[in-house]
Image (tube, grey):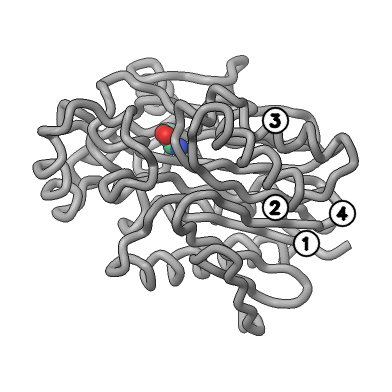
Amino acid sequence: MSAVIVVHGGARAVPDELAKASVDGVKVAARDGFAVLKRGGSALDAVEAAVRTMEDNSVFNAGHGAVLNADGEVELDAIIMDGRTLSSGAVSSVENIANPVSLARAVMEKTDHVILTSRGANQFAESIGVSTVPTDSLVTEFERKEWEKCKTFVTGVKEEINTQWAHDTVGAVAVDCVGNVACATSTGGIRNKMAGRVGDAPIIGCGGFADNFSGAVSCTGHGESILKVTLARLILFHVEQGKSVAESSQLALQYMVDRVHGAGGCIVVSPSGQWTATFTTKRMAWAAVDRDGLWYGLEPNERFNEQLTV
Ligand code: GLY
Protein backbone atom coordinates (compact mmCIF):
# COMPACT_ATOMS: atom_id res chain seq x y z
CA MET A 1 0.00 0.00 0.00
CA SER A 2 1.11 3.59 -0.45
CA ALA A 3 2.12 5.62 2.57
CA VAL A 4 0.44 8.90 3.58
CA ILE A 5 1.38 11.72 5.94
CA VAL A 6 -0.79 14.69 6.99
CA VAL A 7 0.40 17.58 9.18
CA HIS A 8 -1.16 20.71 10.67
CA GLY A 9 0.27 23.94 12.06
CA GLY A 10 -2.66 24.81 14.34
CA ALA A 11 -6.32 25.78 13.92
CA ARG A 12 -6.78 29.47 14.61
CA ALA A 13 -7.18 32.86 12.95
CA VAL A 14 -3.69 32.74 11.44
CA PRO A 15 -2.80 36.43 10.89
CA ASP A 16 -2.16 37.46 7.28
CA GLU A 17 1.48 38.26 8.02
CA LEU A 18 2.07 34.65 9.15
CA ALA A 19 -0.06 32.96 6.46
CA LYS A 20 2.66 32.24 3.91
CA ALA A 21 5.24 31.19 6.51
CA SER A 22 2.68 28.84 8.09
CA VAL A 23 1.81 27.18 4.79
CA ASP A 24 5.48 26.94 3.79
CA GLY A 25 6.24 25.45 7.21
CA VAL A 26 3.65 22.69 7.01
CA LYS A 27 4.73 21.83 3.47
CA VAL A 28 8.34 21.36 4.64
CA ALA A 29 7.17 19.25 7.59
CA ALA A 30 5.02 17.02 5.36
CA ARG A 31 7.96 16.51 2.99
CA ASP A 32 10.28 15.68 5.91
CA GLY A 33 7.79 13.15 7.31
CA PHE A 34 7.15 11.63 3.91
CA ALA A 35 10.88 11.25 3.24
CA VAL A 36 10.96 8.89 6.23
CA LEU A 37 8.04 6.86 4.85
CA LYS A 38 9.52 6.78 1.36
CA ARG A 39 12.69 5.11 2.56
CA GLY A 40 10.58 2.45 4.34
CA GLY A 41 10.50 4.11 7.76
CA SER A 42 7.64 3.61 10.20
CA ALA A 43 4.63 5.87 10.67
CA LEU A 44 5.96 6.54 14.19
CA ASP A 45 9.33 7.77 12.86
CA ALA A 46 7.54 9.88 10.23
CA VAL A 47 5.23 11.73 12.64
CA GLU A 48 8.11 12.39 15.03
CA ALA A 49 10.24 13.81 12.18
CA ALA A 50 7.42 16.02 10.89
CA VAL A 51 6.58 17.40 14.34
CA ARG A 52 10.27 18.05 15.12
CA THR A 53 10.47 20.13 11.93
CA MET A 54 7.56 22.28 13.13
CA GLU A 55 8.91 22.48 16.70
CA ASP A 56 12.12 23.90 15.20
CA ASN A 57 10.19 26.49 13.14
CA SER A 58 9.37 29.52 15.27
CA VAL A 59 6.31 30.43 13.20
CA PHE A 60 4.50 27.65 15.09
CA ASN A 61 3.49 27.44 18.76
CA ALA A 62 5.57 24.38 19.70
CA GLY A 63 9.21 24.09 20.77
CA HIS A 64 10.82 27.26 19.36
CA GLY A 65 8.08 29.87 19.02
CA ALA A 66 6.02 28.67 21.99
CA VAL A 67 3.64 31.08 23.69
CA LEU A 68 4.13 32.31 27.27
CA ASN A 69 1.92 31.58 30.25
CA ALA A 70 0.54 34.17 32.68
CA ASP A 71 3.88 34.22 34.53
CA GLY A 72 5.79 34.83 31.30
CA GLU A 73 7.13 31.25 31.21
CA VAL A 74 7.19 28.51 28.58
CA GLU A 75 5.29 25.29 29.38
CA LEU A 76 5.23 22.72 26.58
CA ASP A 77 2.97 19.68 26.10
CA ALA A 78 3.36 16.81 23.60
CA ILE A 79 2.12 13.30 22.82
CA ILE A 80 3.07 10.50 20.44
CA MET A 81 1.16 7.26 19.89
CA ASP A 82 1.80 4.01 18.02
CA GLY A 83 -1.29 2.46 16.42
CA ARG A 84 0.23 -1.02 16.38
CA THR A 85 0.14 -1.50 20.16
CA LEU A 86 -1.67 1.61 21.53
CA SER A 87 1.63 2.49 23.19
CA SER A 88 1.71 6.18 23.98
CA GLY A 89 4.05 8.65 25.62
CA ALA A 90 3.45 12.25 26.63
CA VAL A 91 4.99 15.14 28.52
CA SER A 92 3.36 18.22 29.98
CA SER A 93 4.63 21.53 31.33
CA VAL A 94 8.24 21.04 30.24
CA GLU A 95 10.27 24.22 30.01
CA ASN A 96 13.63 23.84 28.37
CA ILE A 97 13.27 21.01 25.88
CA ALA A 98 13.48 22.01 22.22
CA ASN A 99 11.71 18.90 20.91
CA PRO A 100 9.09 17.71 23.43
CA VAL A 101 7.75 15.18 20.90
CA SER A 102 11.01 13.21 21.14
CA LEU A 103 10.90 13.33 24.94
CA ALA A 104 7.31 12.01 24.73
CA ARG A 105 8.60 9.17 22.56
CA ALA A 106 11.25 8.39 25.16
CA VAL A 107 8.55 8.26 27.85
CA MET A 108 6.73 5.72 25.68
CA GLU A 109 9.78 3.60 24.94
CA LYS A 110 11.92 3.90 28.06
CA THR A 111 9.46 4.10 30.99
CA ASP A 112 6.48 2.14 32.29
CA HIS A 113 4.38 5.32 32.23
CA VAL A 114 2.30 7.23 29.71
CA ILE A 115 2.69 10.86 30.88
CA LEU A 116 5.45 12.64 32.78
CA THR A 117 5.01 16.23 33.86
CA SER A 118 7.16 19.30 34.67
CA ARG A 119 10.04 18.56 37.11
CA GLY A 120 9.76 14.78 36.73
CA ALA A 121 9.77 15.06 32.94
CA ASN A 122 12.88 17.21 33.10
CA GLN A 123 14.58 14.81 35.51
CA PHE A 124 13.80 11.96 33.14
CA ALA A 125 15.19 13.96 30.19
CA GLU A 126 18.41 14.52 32.12
CA SER A 127 18.64 10.85 33.11
CA ILE A 128 18.57 9.70 29.48
CA GLY A 129 20.86 12.45 28.21
CA VAL A 130 18.30 14.59 26.35
CA SER A 131 19.96 17.96 26.07
CA THR A 132 18.19 20.97 27.45
CA VAL A 133 18.20 24.49 26.00
CA PRO A 134 17.93 27.82 27.81
CA THR A 135 14.20 28.44 28.03
CA ASP A 136 14.68 31.96 26.65
CA SER A 137 16.04 30.50 23.42
CA LEU A 138 12.56 29.05 22.74
CA VAL A 139 10.88 32.46 23.03
CA THR A 140 10.71 34.78 20.04
CA GLU A 141 10.81 38.57 20.15
CA PHE A 142 7.36 38.50 18.53
CA GLU A 143 5.97 36.37 21.39
CA ARG A 144 7.49 38.61 24.09
CA LYS A 145 5.74 41.61 22.51
CA GLU A 146 2.42 39.79 22.06
CA TRP A 147 2.55 38.57 25.66
CA GLU A 148 3.23 42.12 26.91
CA LYS A 149 0.15 43.31 24.99
CA CYS A 150 -2.06 40.45 26.23
CA LYS A 151 -1.03 40.06 29.84
CA THR A 152 -3.57 42.60 30.99
CA PHE A 153 -6.37 40.28 29.83
CA VAL A 154 -7.68 38.22 32.71
CA THR A 155 -7.09 34.65 31.57
CA GLY A 156 -6.02 32.75 28.50
CA VAL A 157 -8.21 29.70 28.84
CA LYS A 158 -11.47 31.59 28.47
CA GLU A 159 -10.34 33.20 25.23
CA GLU A 160 -12.01 31.89 22.15
CA ILE A 161 -9.57 30.27 19.80
CA ASN A 162 -10.62 32.69 17.07
CA THR A 163 -9.28 35.71 18.91
CA GLN A 164 -6.18 37.29 17.56
CA TRP A 165 -3.88 36.38 20.40
CA ALA A 166 -4.83 32.73 20.69
CA HIS A 167 -2.16 30.52 19.20
CA ASP A 168 -2.10 26.81 18.63
CA THR A 169 -0.47 23.46 18.20
CA VAL A 170 1.30 21.37 15.56
CA GLY A 171 0.60 17.74 14.72
CA ALA A 172 1.13 14.88 12.30
CA VAL A 173 -0.57 11.59 11.44
CA ALA A 174 0.76 8.90 9.12
CA VAL A 175 0.18 5.46 7.72
CA ASP A 176 3.28 3.61 6.53
CA CYS A 177 3.67 1.17 3.66
CA VAL A 178 2.73 -1.81 5.85
CA GLY A 179 -0.45 -0.16 7.15
CA ASN A 180 0.65 0.94 10.62
CA VAL A 181 -0.65 4.32 11.82
CA ALA A 182 0.77 6.83 14.31
CA CYS A 183 0.08 10.34 15.57
CA ALA A 184 2.03 13.12 17.29
CA THR A 185 0.96 16.51 18.68
CA SER A 186 3.04 19.27 20.30
CA THR A 187 2.17 22.70 21.67
CA GLY A 188 3.00 25.63 23.90
CA GLY A 189 -0.71 25.79 24.78
CA ILE A 190 -2.64 29.04 25.06
CA ARG A 191 -0.95 32.39 25.63
CA ASN A 192 -1.53 33.75 29.13
CA LYS A 193 -2.71 30.37 30.47
CA MET A 194 -2.35 29.82 34.22
CA ALA A 195 0.98 28.32 35.27
CA GLY A 196 0.51 24.56 35.47
CA ARG A 197 -2.39 24.46 33.04
CA VAL A 198 -2.37 21.29 30.95
CA GLY A 199 -4.25 21.35 27.66
CA ASP A 200 -5.55 18.61 25.41
CA ALA A 201 -2.31 17.91 23.55
CA PRO A 202 -0.64 15.43 25.95
CA ILE A 203 -3.88 13.71 26.96
CA ILE A 204 -4.50 10.43 25.19
CA GLY A 205 -7.78 10.44 23.23
CA CYS A 206 -7.95 14.24 23.32
CA GLY A 207 -4.94 15.80 21.55
CA GLY A 208 -4.25 12.60 19.68
CA PHE A 209 -5.00 8.92 19.29
CA ALA A 210 -3.73 6.16 17.02
CA ASP A 211 -5.12 2.68 16.56
CA ASN A 212 -4.41 0.38 13.63
CA PHE A 213 -8.04 -0.82 13.86
CA SER A 214 -9.47 2.63 12.99
CA GLY A 215 -6.90 5.38 12.28
CA ALA A 216 -4.73 8.14 13.67
CA VAL A 217 -5.82 11.64 14.72
CA SER A 218 -4.04 14.82 15.83
CA CYS A 219 -6.23 17.61 17.20
CA THR A 220 -5.78 21.37 17.51
CA GLY A 221 -7.91 24.16 18.93
CA HIS A 222 -9.26 25.27 22.27
CA GLY A 223 -7.77 22.71 24.65
CA GLU A 224 -10.42 22.84 27.36
CA SER A 225 -13.12 22.19 24.74
CA ILE A 226 -11.17 19.33 23.16
CA LEU A 227 -10.69 17.76 26.61
CA LYS A 228 -14.42 17.93 27.38
CA VAL A 229 -15.43 16.06 24.23
CA THR A 230 -12.32 13.77 24.04
CA LEU A 231 -12.09 14.89 20.44
CA ALA A 232 -9.56 12.41 18.99
CA ARG A 233 -11.46 9.39 20.35
CA LEU A 234 -14.81 10.89 19.33
CA ILE A 235 -13.60 11.17 15.73
CA LEU A 236 -12.43 7.55 15.74
CA PHE A 237 -15.71 6.45 17.33
CA HIS A 238 -17.49 7.76 14.23
CA VAL A 239 -14.93 6.03 12.00
CA GLU A 240 -15.63 2.78 13.88
CA GLN A 241 -19.33 3.28 13.07
CA GLY A 242 -18.43 3.10 9.36
CA LYS A 243 -18.28 6.79 8.50
CA SER A 244 -15.50 8.26 6.36
CA VAL A 245 -12.65 10.09 8.08
CA ALA A 246 -13.92 13.39 6.60
CA GLU A 247 -17.49 12.94 7.83
CA SER A 248 -16.30 11.68 11.22
CA SER A 249 -14.13 14.78 11.67
CA GLN A 250 -16.94 17.14 10.67
CA LEU A 251 -19.42 15.45 13.02
CA ALA A 252 -17.05 15.55 15.99
CA LEU A 253 -15.92 19.14 15.43
CA GLN A 254 -19.53 20.28 15.00
CA TYR A 255 -20.45 18.46 18.22
CA MET A 256 -17.68 20.41 19.98
CA VAL A 257 -19.12 23.69 18.62
CA ASP A 258 -22.70 22.78 19.58
CA ARG A 259 -21.99 21.21 22.97
CA VAL A 260 -19.22 23.37 24.45
CA HIS A 261 -18.87 26.28 21.95
CA GLY A 262 -15.32 25.22 21.15
CA ALA A 263 -13.57 25.68 17.82
CA GLY A 264 -10.73 23.56 16.53
CA GLY A 265 -9.38 21.31 13.85
CA CYS A 266 -7.97 17.87 13.19
CA ILE A 267 -6.07 15.72 10.76
CA VAL A 268 -6.96 12.05 10.37
CA VAL A 269 -5.58 9.11 8.39
CA SER A 270 -7.05 5.62 8.17
CA PRO A 271 -5.04 2.40 7.85
CA SER A 272 -6.21 2.19 4.21
CA GLY A 273 -4.82 5.66 3.45
CA GLN A 274 -8.02 7.76 3.52
CA TRP A 275 -7.17 11.16 5.01
CA THR A 276 -8.66 14.53 5.87
CA ALA A 277 -7.76 17.96 7.29
CA THR A 278 -10.83 19.65 8.79
CA PHE A 279 -11.39 22.73 10.99
CA THR A 280 -14.06 25.05 12.38
CA THR A 281 -11.67 27.96 13.03
CA LYS A 282 -11.03 30.72 10.51
CA ARG A 283 -7.88 29.07 9.20
CA MET A 284 -5.63 26.03 9.69
CA ALA A 285 -2.37 25.51 7.80
CA TRP A 286 -2.13 21.86 6.76
CA ALA A 287 -0.27 19.72 4.24
CA ALA A 288 -0.37 16.09 3.17
CA VAL A 289 1.60 13.79 0.90
CA ASP A 290 -0.04 10.79 -0.74
CA ARG A 291 0.42 8.92 -4.02
CA ASP A 292 -0.91 11.99 -5.90
CA GLY A 293 1.71 14.38 -4.58
CA LEU A 294 1.71 17.23 -2.07
CA TRP A 295 -1.60 18.73 -0.95
CA TYR A 296 -1.99 21.84 1.21
CA GLY A 297 -4.36 24.59 2.32
CA LEU A 298 -5.08 27.33 4.84
CA GLU A 299 -8.64 28.61 4.26
CA PRO A 300 -11.81 26.49 4.64
CA ASN A 301 -12.32 24.19 1.62
CA GLU A 302 -8.95 25.13 0.13
CA ARG A 303 -7.00 22.24 -1.38
CA PHE A 304 -4.00 22.85 -3.62
CA ASN A 305 -1.93 20.10 -5.22
CA GLU A 306 1.70 20.07 -6.36
CA GLN A 307 3.94 17.35 -7.69
CA LEU A 308 6.36 16.21 -5.06
CA THR A 309 10.00 16.87 -5.87
CA VAL A 310 11.96 15.07 -3.17
N1 GLY B 1 -4.79 22.85 21.74
C1 GLY B 1 -3.71 23.29 22.50
C2 GLY B 1 -4.07 23.74 23.82
O1 GLY B 1 -5.18 24.22 24.05
O2 GLY B 1 -3.25 23.65 24.69
Query: Alpha carbon of mark 2 to alpha carbon of mark 4: how far?
Result: 11 Å
Marking on residue 233 = 3
Residue displayed at 52% across by 69% down: 27
Residue of label 2: 174
Dot 1 amino acid type: Ala
Q: Could you tell which of marks 4 and 1 lies nearer the N-terminus?
A: 1
Mark 2 residue type: Ala
* Residue type beneath disc 3: Arg
Image height of 308 relative to 9, above or below = below
Name the residue nearer the viewer: 77 or 104.
77
Q: Position of residue 121 (x, y in %)?
A: 41, 22
Which residue is drawn at the image coordinates 57% and 56% (left, top)?
7
Residue that carries the numbered disc 4 in the rendered image: 272
Q: Nearer the viewer, mark 3 or mark 4?
A: 3
Asked if the residue under mark 1 is in contact with the one under mark 2, i.e. CB atoms within 8 Å, the reply is yes
Q: Quadrant of the C terminus?
A: bottom right
Disc 4 residue type (three-letter): Ser
The foreground one among 291 and 299 is: 299
> For mark 1, what is the residue?
3
Separation of residues labelled 2 and 1 (CA atoms) = 7 Å
Q: Is residue 213 visible?
A: yes
Give the mark, 3 or 2, whose residue is nearer the N terminus.
2
Mark carried by residue 125: none
* Residue 47 left/right relative to 51: right
Q: In which quadrant of this rendering is ligand 1 seen?
A: top left
Q: Tag 3: Cα neighbours inside 10 Å, few (<14), some, or many (≥20)?
A: many
In this picture, is 128 found above or below 144?
Answer: above
Foreground: 250 or 298?
A: 250
Q: Tell me the residue at 40%/64% (across/down).
A: 22
| Residue 80 quadrant | top right
Q: Distance from label 4 to label 1 (Cα)?
A: 9 Å
